[in-house]
Image (cartoon, rainbow, N blue to C red):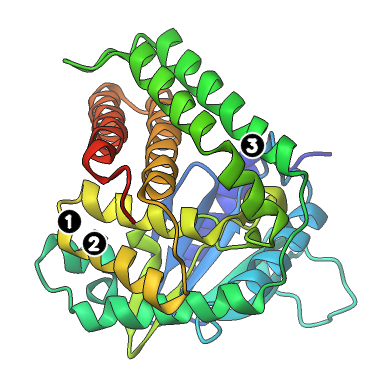
Amino acid sequence: MRTPLASQRRMVQSLLTDPSVLDHGPASCIETHFSWVILTRRFAFKLKKALDEPLLHHETPRDRRLACQSEVHLNRRLAADVYIGVIGLCGDAKGRLDRCRDGTVEADEYLVKMVRLHERQNLQWQIRHGRLDPADLDALIDLLAGFYRRSPPEWLSPRAHWQRMQRQVGEEIGELARHSIRPPGLSLDNLGAALRRLGGELRQLIEERVRTGHIHEVHGDLRPEHVYFAGAPMVIDCLEFSRPLRLQDPLEEIAFLAMECERMGATEAAHRLRTRFARTYDEDSPAGLWHFYAARRALLWAVLAIRHRSHSDARGENDWYDRAGDYLALAEGHLNRLTPERNGH
């Protein structure tokens, strides 16, 4: 039976008001669509919401325990020093909370315990404040290139992989159209047609990359807000809830990160990520593939922005609508940029 969200909210409030449970001082809380994150001076504790959504089944404490264990295991690949472990919480007859000291007892709730990272070490913060060190980007790419090399190739159906990409473009354009998204000067139909046309031109190359082992299990959500430079680079918050969504061409993952940097105005950083990855990972692919990957990721995130819009208040709706427009403009920009680069690398 699914845990009531109301009881989880009461638990969060108890954790904030009783520092003895988590052995912390003053604490604050950030609520997202999927979880609550309790922040103390030294640590962060994530409590997953009892949700039942496509690809996300966290209804019971057992579901959430497994999800927490998976999150810790997967994120230690790129941020081993951040993810401390999973802790269980038990309530007594009077509703008071405490840590479950007996590992054989099923807990009432589970949390991921992490080291709290400083905002100024975050790639997103550094881009916004003009504090990015290009050497950090090089170190990040070196870290990711080693991570991809250690991940064994995944053997998918080349034809099915390409067909899924083309089908997703049509589905995403259709979803945006249903929400009446019409950014000034941009035609959704033309954007979708251009992206599918480029995908058609690249079909042989994409299928060949699948056949020759270019699909790996990657991070899956490589955005600037998940990248930190604390001495060595580290990447947190991988897409832990769906392994199929983590199976990608690493080139696409880097194109996504570069596109996100570009959205924030860091075009030099985007270019450095692309060139460093090409050299470090020995990635010699046509420009068309890079732009195809970046454009399709921008289209996907336009859709995700519109989905977030439905969960926002009136002010937030406009923010997400504007963000969707920014992503669509980026997608169109990558397709337009391809013309002079078409025969280049």
Q: Distance between the Cα atoms at labels 1 and 2?
A: 6 Å
Q: Earlier in the sequence, mark 1 or mark 3?
A: 3
Judge from the rendering whether residue 2 lies leftward or rightward of residue 294; answer left or right: right
Residue 96 in picture, x, y percent from top left: 66, 64
Q: CA distance from mark 2 to mark 3?
A: 26 Å
Looking at the rendered image, the quarter that the N terminus falls into is: top right
Please tell me which of labels 2 and 3 falls first in the chain. Answer: 3
Question: Of tags 1 and 2, which is closer to the observer?
Answer: 2
Question: What's the residue at 64%, 72% (across, down)?
Answer: 72
Label 3: few (<14), some (14–19) or many (≥20) C-alpha neighbours in 10 Å: some
SS label for mark 3: helix
Where is mark 2, residue-wise?
Answer: 271
Q: Residue 257, image x and y in percent?
A: 37, 57
Q: Is residue 95 above or below residue 343?
A: below
Q: Is residue 35 visible?
A: yes
**Pointers 1 and 2 in contact (CB under 8 A)?**
yes
- x%, y% of residue 60? 79, 48
Q: Is residue 270 left or right of residue 174?
A: left
- Disc 2 vs disc 3: Cβ atoms closer than 8 Å? no
Indicate the amino acid at tag 1. Answer: Thr
Which of the numbered marks, if any, corresponds to residue 162? 3
Q: Residue lying at the far left in this picture: please name it.
A: 130
Residue in view at x 48 percent, y 58 percent: 251
Please say if 244 is above or below 111. above
**Viewer-nearest of discs 1 and 3:** 3
The residue identified by callout 1 is 267
**Badge 2, how many Cα within 10 Å: few under 14, some, many 20+?**
some
Report the amino acid beneath label 3: Trp
* Residue 15 % position (x, y): 52, 64
